[in-house]
Amino acid sequence: MKFILIDKIDKIETGKEIQTVKNVSLSEEYLGDHFPIFPVLPGVFLLQGLIESGCWLVRHSENFAHSMVLLTQAKNVKYKSFAAPGMNIRYTVTAKSIEETVSSFSAVGTCDGQPIVEARFGLRHFNLAERDPKLVIEDGHIISKLKERFRLLASGSGAA
C-alpha cells in the first residue's frame, strides 16, 4: 500500500518555504489498526507529511530535475500531540539549504495553531540514470507523474 500524506499545497515560495495541508479522515485504512478505540494518525505518518512537503519544495525549486528525493536523516523529531480524524494538519517546511544533490529543512506540523510535530531533516536528490544509464526513460516517466500530482496538489495555490 502506498500512502500520500499531503492533500493540498497551500503556499510555496521557491527555494524557501512550503505550506501544505493534511485532512485526517476516519476512512483512512491504517486508523482502524492504530489504536482502534482511540484512532490517531501514527507519529511516523506525521513525520512523513513533513518530509513529503519538503520533497515537493525541492522538486518545485529545482524544476523537477530529479526523479528521486529521499530522506537521509531526521533529527530532533518532537511529537507534541495527537492528530485524530476530523483534524486538519498544516505543515510548514522551511529550507535551510537546497543544493544540487542535498537539502536540509526545519519543519512544524500544527492543528488549530498548536504544534503537534516538529523536526529537522535532510533529503538527497538524484536520478536513477546516474547509476544506470538505461533508466533514463524511467526517470522521465517518474518526473512526468510527479509533475501531474504536483498540479493536482497545488491547484488553487498559484504554484501550479
Image (cartoon, rainbow, N blue to C red):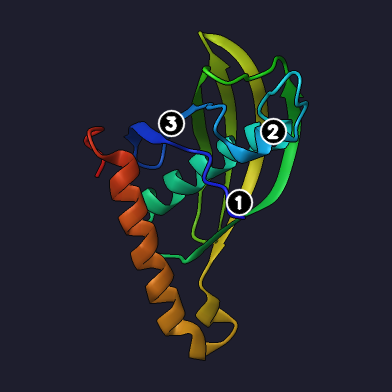
Give the mark, 3 or 2, whose residue is nearer the N terminus. Answer: 3
> Is 149 drawn above or below residue 94 in the view shown?
below
C-alpha span from label 3 to label 2: 25 Å
Provide residue 108's location: percent of width, then percent of height. Answer: 58, 24
Question: What is the residue that sits farthest to the top in this orientation?
Answer: 113
> Is residue 70 toward the left or the right of residue 112 in the image?
right
User: Residue at coordinates 36% horizontally, 52% vertically from top-left?
Assistant: 149
> Is 27 drawn above or below residue 67 in the view shown?
above
Camera sees residue 63: no
Mark 1 and 2 residues: CB-CB less than 8 Å, in contact? no
> Is residue 42 toward the left or the right of residue 154 in the image?
right
- Looking at the picture, tell me which residue is in the foreground, 53 or 36: 36
Of tags 3 and 2, the one toward the viewer is: 2
Give the mark, 1 or 3, whose residue is nearer the N terminus. Answer: 3
The amino acid beneath tag 2 is Gly
The residue where tag 2 is placed is 32
- Looking at the picture, tell me which residue is in the foreground, 105 or 154: 154
Of tags 1 and 2, the one toward the viewer is: 2
> Is residue 15 toward the left or the right of residue 82 in the image?
left
Give the mark, 1 or 2, whose residue is nearer the N terminus. Answer: 2
The residue where tag 3 is placed is 20
The circle drawn on residue 123 is 1
